[in-house]
Image: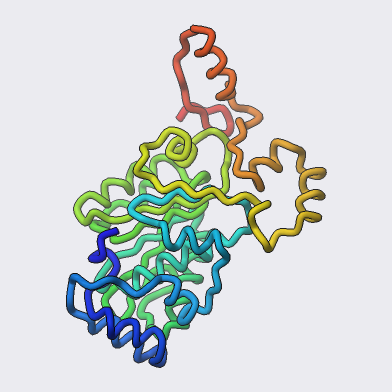
């Protein structure tokens, strides 16, 4: 990963700040750094010592392996939004004058994500200026929360990081509107979601996207906070298909989807030709 995406300056000062200084002194040290070629402080040091977030083993993998393009497919109630907020807060803290965009399917969900980012940065001693959905910290970094509508997200340039939470339920138009923003600044993109059918950009990137994505899968059975007894009840109540989608990272064809992917795979294997179409949940063409 390109260090310039994360930090400009003073590795020794930064490590000392993270380990020994008060939160306010830490922020001053981070924002005063000037050398463009030094390595950033460890994200795990920052989230543990200054965000008061103790990630589990899989959350550590997401934080450490994010890279340029991150795809996280995970169970419900794993801490996806908290992990996404930690990525965004760390980027703001260590990349002065950067722009971080956070997107969710609804404005309410975006607000919840931004609240988590705010809380992490306030714990680190940052003074935030702005409103509930957008703010700036002392090093000039800005964090903006956007609604999940493609027509409302244009006009931002060169973001350092874009985080799309619950990406499987965000409309394709928004994704197509956001991607060009990354061109000028060579920004990073993180898509995090529980599956929501064999549809939309999240499924396509996960199943058919290029190899430059870092793909991480976390099932409920991998999460130490979800009890096996709870999962047994959910399997019985929700049924096998819905349970597999919500808790086992399976992309299940929607009940009113005009076709299922496995049918097309079988048809192709038998030498039949077909024209592939994408459908929305209610059978409408994309």
Where is the C terminus found, in terms of image quarters?
top left
* Image coordinates for residue 231, horizontal then vertical, percent: 76, 51
Taking 145 as reference, is 276 above or below it?
A: above
* Image coordinates for residue 2, horizontal then vertical, percent: 25, 60
Taking 53 as reference, is 263 above or below it?
A: above
* Image coordinates for residue 7, horizontal then vertical, percent: 27, 71
Q: How many marks?
A: 0
Q: Residue at x 40, y 91 (%)?
A: 20
Q: Residue at x 27, y 67 (%)?
A: 98
Q: Name the image quarter holding residue 87.
A: bottom left
Residue 258 visible at all: no
Q: Name the image quarter holding residue 23.
A: bottom left
Q: Residue at x 43, y 68 (%)?
A: 133
Residue 67 visible at all: yes
Taking 55 as reference, is 195 above or below it?
A: above
Where is the N terminus found, in terms of image quarters?
bottom left
- Tell me: 212 left or right of 269: left
């Amino acid at each position: 990963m390109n260090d310039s995406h994360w930090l400009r300056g003073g590795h020794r000062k930064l490590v000392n700040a993270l380990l020994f200084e008060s939160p306010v002194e830490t922020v001053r040290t981070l924002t005063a750094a000037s050398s463009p070629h030094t390595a950033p402080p460890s994200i795990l040091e920052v989230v543990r010592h200054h965000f008061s977030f103790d990630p589990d083993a899989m959350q550590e993998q997401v934080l450490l392996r994010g890279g340029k393009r991150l795809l996280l497919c995970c169970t419900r109630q794993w801490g996806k939004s908290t992990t996404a907020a930690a990525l965004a807060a760390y980027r703001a803290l260590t990349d002065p004058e950067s722009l971080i965009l956070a997107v969710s399917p609804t404005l309410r969900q975006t607000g919840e994500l931004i609240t988590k980012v705010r809380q992490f940065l306030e714990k680190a001693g940052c003074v935030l200026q702005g409103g509930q959905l957008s703010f700036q910290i002392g090093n000039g970094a800005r964090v903006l929360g956007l609604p999940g509508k493609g027509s409302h997200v244009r006009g931002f340039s060169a973001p350092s990081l874009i985080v799309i939470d619950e990406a499987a339920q965000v409309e394709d138009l928004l994704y197509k509107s956001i991607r060009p923003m990354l061109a000028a600044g060579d920004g990073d993109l993180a898509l995090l979601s529980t599956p929501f059918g064999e549809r939309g950009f999240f499924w396509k990137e996960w199943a058919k996207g290029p190899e430059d994505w870092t793909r991480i899968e976390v099932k409920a059975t991998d999460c130490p906070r979800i009890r096996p007894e709870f999962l047994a009840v959910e399997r019985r109540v929700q049924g096998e298909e819905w349970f597999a989608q919500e808790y086992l990272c399976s992309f299940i064809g929607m009940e009113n989807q005009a076709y299922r992917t496995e049918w097309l795979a079988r048809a192709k294997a038998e030498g039949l030709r077909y024209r592939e179409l994408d459908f929305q949940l209610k059978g409408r063409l994309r």
